[in-house]
Image (tube, coloured by chain):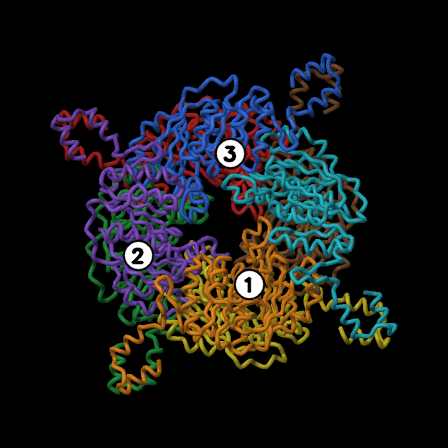
Chain colours: A green, B blue, C red, D cyan, E brown, F yellow, G orange, H purple
Amino acid sequence: MKSLLDAVASGQVGVDTALAQLDAAPVDDLGFATLDQHRALRQGYPEVVFGQGKTPEQVTAICARIAEHGDGFLVTRAAPDVLDALLGAWPDVERNDLARTALLRAQAPRARGTRAVTIVTAGTSDLPVAEEAAVTLDAIGHPVLRVTDVGVAGIHRVLARRDALHEAAVVIVVAGMDGALPSVVGGLVRGPVIAVPTSVGYGAAFGGLAPLLTMLNSCAAGVVVCNIDNGFGAAIAAARILDQ
Amino acid sequence: MKSLLDAVASGQVGVDTALAQLDAAPVDDLGFATLDQHRALRQGYPEVVFGQGKTPEQVTAICARIAEHGDGFLVTRAAPDVLDALLGAWPDVERNDLARTALLRAQAPRARGTRAVTIVTAGTSDLPVAEEAAVTLDAIGHPVLRVTDVGVAGIHRVLARRDALHEAAVVIVVAGMDGALPSVVGGLVRGPVIAVPTSVGYGAAFGGLAPLLTMLNSCAAGVVVCNIDNGFGAAIAAARILDQ
Amino acid sequence: MKSLLDAVASGQVGVDTALAQLDAAPVDDLGFATLDQHRALRQGYPEVVFGQGKTPEQVTAICARIAEHGDGFLVTRAAPDVLDALLGAWPDVERNDLARTALLRAQAPRARGTRAVTIVTAGTSDLPVAEEAAVTLDAIGHPVLRVTDVGVAGIHRVLARRDALHEAAVVIVVAGMDGALPSVVGGLVRGPVIAVPTSVGYGAAFGGLAPLLTMLNSCAAGVVVCNIDNGFGAAIAAARILDQ
Amino acid sequence: MKSLLDAVASGQVGVDTALAQLDAAPVDDLGFATLDQHRALRQGYPEVVFGQGKTPEQVTAICARIAEHGDGFLVTRAAPDVLDALLGAWPDVERNDLARTALLRAQAPRARGTRAVTIVTAGTSDLPVAEEAAVTLDAIGHPVLRVTDVGVAGIHRVLARRDALHEAAVVIVVAGMDGALPSVVGGLVRGPVIAVPTSVGYGAAFGGLAPLLTMLNSCAAGVVVCNIDNGFGAAIAAARILDQ
Amino acid sequence: MKSLLDAVASGQVGVDTALAQLDAAPVDDLGFATLDQHRALRQGYPEVVFGQGKTPEQVTAICARIAEHGDGFLVTRAAPDVLDALLGAWPDVERNDLARTALLRAQAPRARGTRAVTIVTAGTSDLPVAEEAAVTLDAIGHPVLRVTDVGVAGIHRVLARRDALHEAAVVIVVAGMDGALPSVVGGLVRGPVIAVPTSVGYGAAFGGLAPLLTMLNSCAAGVVVCNIDNGFGAAIAAARILDQ
Amino acid sequence: MKSLLDAVASGQVGVDTALAQLDAAPVDDLGFATLDQHRALRQGYPEVVFGQGKTPEQVTAICARIAEHGDGFLVTRAAPDVLDALLGAWPDVERNDLARTALLRAQAPRARGTRAVTIVTAGTSDLPVAEEAAVTLDAIGHPVLRVTDVGVAGIHRVLARRDALHEAAVVIVVAGMDGALPSVVGGLVRGPVIAVPTSVGYGAAFGGLAPLLTMLNSCAAGVVVCNIDNGFGAAIAAARILDQ
Amino acid sequence: MKSLLDAVASGQVGVDTALAQLDAAPVDDLGFATLDQHRALRQGYPEVVFGQGKTPEQVTAICARIAEHGDGFLVTRAAPDVLDALLGAWPDVERNDLARTALLRAQAPRARGTRAVTIVTAGTSDLPVAEEAAVTLDAIGHPVLRVTDVGVAGIHRVLARRDALHEAAVVIVVAGMDGALPSVVGGLVRGPVIAVPTSVGYGAAFGGLAPLLTMLNSCAAGVVVCNIDNGFGAAIAAARILDQ
Amino acid sequence: MKSLLDAVASGQVGVDTALAQLDAAPVDDLGFATLDQHRALRQGYPEVVFGQGKTPEQVTAICARIAEHGDGFLVTRAAPDVLDALLGAWPDVERNDLARTALLRAQAPRARGTRAVTIVTAGTSDLPVAEEAAVTLDAIGHPVLRVTDVGVAGIHRVLARRDALHEAAVVIVVAGMDGALPSVVGGLVRGPVIAVPTSVGYGAAFGGLAPLLTMLNSCAAGVVVCNIDNGFGAAIAAARILDQ
């Protein structure tokens, strides 16, 4: 903006032109999507495409526009036909069926971080959400440690992994059912703990409402919460902490 | 019923009289309450009066009818004016303001049980509910152990009390907020675990809904759940186990 | 732990080795699941695998690791393709399509209990949940009685089965729709009553929420509640009572 | 309307006048309330004033307008200060503090009905709602039988009163907590059963939501339901049946 | 019961035999369902089988046991494969795909009633529920009038059918979306009005919760409510009124 | 109505005939639907058929009756098989798969309006709802501007389109997930803002409940809200404003 | 902004100064509130202060800052002590206890509009919300018509006032309980209809949730909805329509 | 633990003594509360006492035990009588009525951090929650910046404060009503954003549920959420980030 104002001050750019440019935000309109080519700059992360509710054609079109600029992309919540389409278009895409993601690395990726994020899961069924978080962190350059299937009903399992918790810069805890694990982890570590409820469970889990409420009411102070099944959001939250 | 049929068979009691007696259930109608003088027999416990929503006059009238037969009574959810009225009428009443109970022991109480119930609370604010359970168990003759303020955010606190958990015949776990404690306790002990959610907590605890859902979804198999703040119900559930 | 400390005291085990062993919990990591080979010891029951949300391959891999040690397993919430895979791998597996379970008995099973659990259902549609409870109890060695289709709208049906209720050590009551049956049963028997709401019913049953709330608010004191459709949990709760 | 059209046809009434009369509904505007003096005719019942959220002055003004025409009135949900004001203005008003009602009988009341409505309550705390129903039925001329405190946890209590149920033209069942009583009553009688949930109960009763859902899901076919605590509505529903 | 007691009094039946007979309720156990052959007598209606959640084999087995006694049956909530199976087994079955019902009339049906039930629907999408009510009423011998697609947004449509409303002994109003129609109908007629919410509607209808709440809060006094989509229940409620 | 009364006054129409005509509302009964041929007149819009829950046969029959009178129709929420059937019957039908609509323009359409409605969407996944609104507005003759994919997380995107907002007569804002966009738009423009929540989003969006609540609680005064996913309703609301 | 850029272009304002001014929004910080003195300009309405949750001192301080500039203010949701404080500070304040508002007219008020808003209420208890809307419209210069107590259970009452509905530029409909009135009104008028649910009603109204859902699901197309009890919001929505 | 094992290895400590010490967790039992004197060490923060639901006597007793060791304390959610009691006992207590906190600084406080936390509020009514966060951060040694009353309906207000957002190490955003502010802030800054919903708002805010859901569904990736009104939790979450 400063350069634009400089140009106005020097007479290189007229007032009307400047007004028009100020209104012309750096967006790129595909008709069905407004791409934001400067977002990478502003947010510091590669472009992410939320795949749910989009057709393979829509996702491919959006990704093509991104790849055109040499940027990489990460597609989340991708159904199998979306993953097929993306792999067909870009053979270098890294496909992860458990995480439901497709990743094309940028041609000039960021340097990798040195501090790890530990992702803890309460049960096997929580793995897809944890994996979405792990792929996302990998895509934006942060190392990941995994501590798997350490629900609180066998409390010695999580206690046995205290080292992996303590050496983490950030801990992401993924849990469905009773969602109790973040409260225990939050009491074991001093650093940031990000809790992600999952929609795993019997009837009164109500699609993840039960662990969501558990985590919001955690008796371990300072545990923060993401949306149900939102592994991607947890990864970005961790990156916001690590990248500052 | 057998004796009635014997009497019919022997001609001592006519058919019409027998029919009338079969219809005349052993209830005692006060107009606003149907007292069930045989319930003590059927359920094995002293008469309990639920005080909430009743006036001091109503509670006193019900208790008078019970005490008339030499039975004891336990009034729960008693407001201070109800407690005052009961102590005024029966100086031997044991008043507990924290538990909001009034207890008049029966003239011929049951023999005390030998196996203890351990009542565990997650935080100080859960004490009124735990105390309601403790008073109820005492009233019906079962010893009680207390493990207080051992929420899972400081997991070593509950681990330090493992002995008190293991020696219990039944464990009652009272917790508000995240309600995570029963999952940990359920993993530590092999015997029955009864979870009681409390209405203690910040906004999204929604009056106890959060710990209620947590407990229903406990990852420790076989943990059973009572209504929110229902210390009385948990005590009776424990007695159902111990008294069989 | 005592033997480890003895070894440290006698110099047989060095301090560092002891520290490492204390941290090495008796868990067995498959990557996607942390098996707990000591759980049978701690909980007293065979290993149970929750089949929902797991692929046939994942379930088979977990079961193989268990069976390797001569232990039996019980898979619950198993979809037909999971049941097919298990029967393919272990011809001795007992398959129950109504209960959605697969059971491989341990090579050295526990002695059977002598006291029966009575499982009561309100309607025919509640049978899958009741059957999951029955299979589980059978797997861990407790005899089961069944009282079927005795909903409270025909109150004589449950009254006609009072004997089967009174001789039970524990009664499990499974009901959808209004969930009223546990309140009646709870008034008829003095022993433990475990209520299981089911997701059976018309619109405002809201997937089992209606009977769940009914049971939590039961006017029969001391009735305890499991999660919606959680026949397995009810069986384990009964076993916690019987096995102490 | 026919007489108006006759008058138009005969020329006695002009078209414009007829149009105006058709628009002039038989309402009586007090500024803050539109009284409907023909409603008694249309609905067949005395005028009822819902007292909640109205000041004593508002209620008195409305009642004065009704009484002016010699009609009686029934004020429901009346706070003590409203009851005081009404008794001050009309000494013949019948005040009922339990039901929170004030009744002024019409100068020319309807003939009383001959068939009784039986009002059944599960517990003592349900009495205010039952009493509102009873007062309303009395106000519009129907006899009432009461069966009190016969909750299903002591199933013999309601069975003992089967006669009072069978002789009723309509049964109103009032219950809080688990709301199970209407399912049992609905199985015992063949006539109409109207269920009224009350806001009585512990935490997870959620202000009457629990018994409301129970009743809507009643396994006794044909049980119909009123709003929570709506004794008045149940009485009018019974009168709709009896008065046709 | 009287005849049994007479037999005991006369010595024809011994006491033990009488006790056994009193316990042997008139139920018929199929293993997965307890048929109640006396229910027809007690409730006055043909046997009804709730088809949802039952396999074609289960439904056919239950129906066979009923038909064996010459009784008719009505299967509700029947999936197409259930309807196929029933028609295959009993060619006289009347199949209604809109209502999802199968009806086999009894060999000796009840005399038909003379007073009609008017079934009113707000929109075309409410028809399946209305038709379930109509088939049920027909099955138990009551004539039905239909007033279709008269939602309140075109208020003249329902006003135009006032005659059909006034001549009804009972009015059943079926509505989804805003559920406002019963309030208008309840103000137009003096007789009983039974409201049935349907699960028809956009997002915030929440599967019928919106019209359910509307109807429970109806400003027309004395409107009573059935469960969501419960056309069967509304028909039985009407029959309870007409058959007394 | 005036003309009818004039005819009565002049003797051209007898009283009985007039009564009959007054009762004969301008409705057209198809058995399963009551068509309202005067609605176009009363509401000023072409006939709209809500396609959800109707079979292709039902929709085609309704549309045939409308088209018979030379009127156009708009079918919303049409499944692919409904769209196929309509295009088969009327080749001039304009099919829109994204909006799930079929439009047959009237033979004598209304003159087009001159003031545009701007439809703003927060994300690509909100497009189907926005498109339903756009097709509806087009069908009833109002021009539409589109501002796409301008969610508030990139606030410059919506700021860049301020002109398109300011020149609109009405702004419709369609958003899922956090539903925050209407609050920002409502602060930027002075004219009417109609907010439409969509069912797009992760777990705790609860099918559109989250953005619905956000919009109802908008801190921008005077923002009004439609039902979840109700693009059609938003368009009609805009037309109510523009057509007065 | 254009004048600022002109000044930059002409050299009158330096680039750094311009940057600073662009960042310096026209806000006025009181520490606990950021007053927006340009909002009147941007939104076109006098400054409104939301009184709920603010102390009399806070409200008075905010109003003083506004009045200083000669602007008027409208305080909504004002508790009695807030109203007292405002009247004490500004004797010209117009106090309305029913609406809970205090209005100080601006020294140079806007010209009054010529088209009226009709505010319709279903019952007397809805009046406070309707009055809040009326005071707000008056404060910003729009005439108001009132149609009171015309709930749909007496459908002739609202039909009798059709004229007042038809002559309105905008209709605001305020209703609690079943919230059915907007659906009827929406079918009677062609212009904009704004529905406001109120928290008036029995138990299952759930604080206004019932009428809120009813209105969102209105079968009258194009009815839009405000938050519960939000008379102020409805008035501003009407003004957004009238002032464009 | 290592030193204990060293002592065992060297024979200084016997095995039984070691076992006892391992079981003796560093807790301090007051009967109604289990103080955790090592928590300061483990969590790194001063002892915090949650005041809600505790009597002044209970709070004072807990604080006395803490102060005894020279530690400071922070009491949150303190009612006025609790604040009075604490100030009476310790004149150095810093009382904050808006935040409802009492702070006694430790005799040897931690060194203050150098990076600031910016706390942003949407409206004046959100201030108590923001202030609780600010007091907590101050108590544990982190500087705070405040940006007040910048709700999104006046989007320029928050844009004007971009500098204060960008220079923050962590941003805490406190908002009630629509809860939209964190989505905008999350798009403006790259660092961690912690959202706190408040219970401020009209009817359908449902005690903070509306902004809670908004924030969980934020379209700005990586925004994390605390419980409703939980300013304390947000502060601790920020400290977890800053103190690692």
Residue D99, image quadrant = top right
| Residue occupying the point 20% across, 48% down | H110
User: Is the same chain shared between marks 1 and 2?
Assistant: no
Instruction: Rate crowding at label 2 as few (under 14), some (14 to 19) or many (20 or more) other CA atoms within 10 Å.
Output: many
User: Mark 3 belongs to which amino acid?
Assistant: Ala
Q: Which mark is residue G96?
A: 1
> In terms of secondary structure, where does tag 2 sit?
helix
- Circle 1: residue type: Asn
In the image, farthest residue toward the right: D10
What is the number of the mark on residue G28? none
Would you name the residue on which mark 3 appears?
B78
Q: Chain of mark 2?
A: A
Type of amino acid under label 2: Ala
Label 1 neighbour load within 10 Å: few <14, some 14-19, many 20+: some
Across and down, in percent, residue C222 comes to 50, 31
Q: Which residue is mark 2?
A: A237
Q: Residue at x 81, y 67 (%)?
A: F19
Question: Quadrant location of residue F219?
Answer: bottom left
Q: Secondary structure at mark 3?
A: loop
Relative to residue F209, is residue A108 depicted above or below?
A: below
Residue located farthest toward the left when viewing the structure as drawn: H10
Q: Residue placed at 55% from the left, 65% from the top?
A: G133
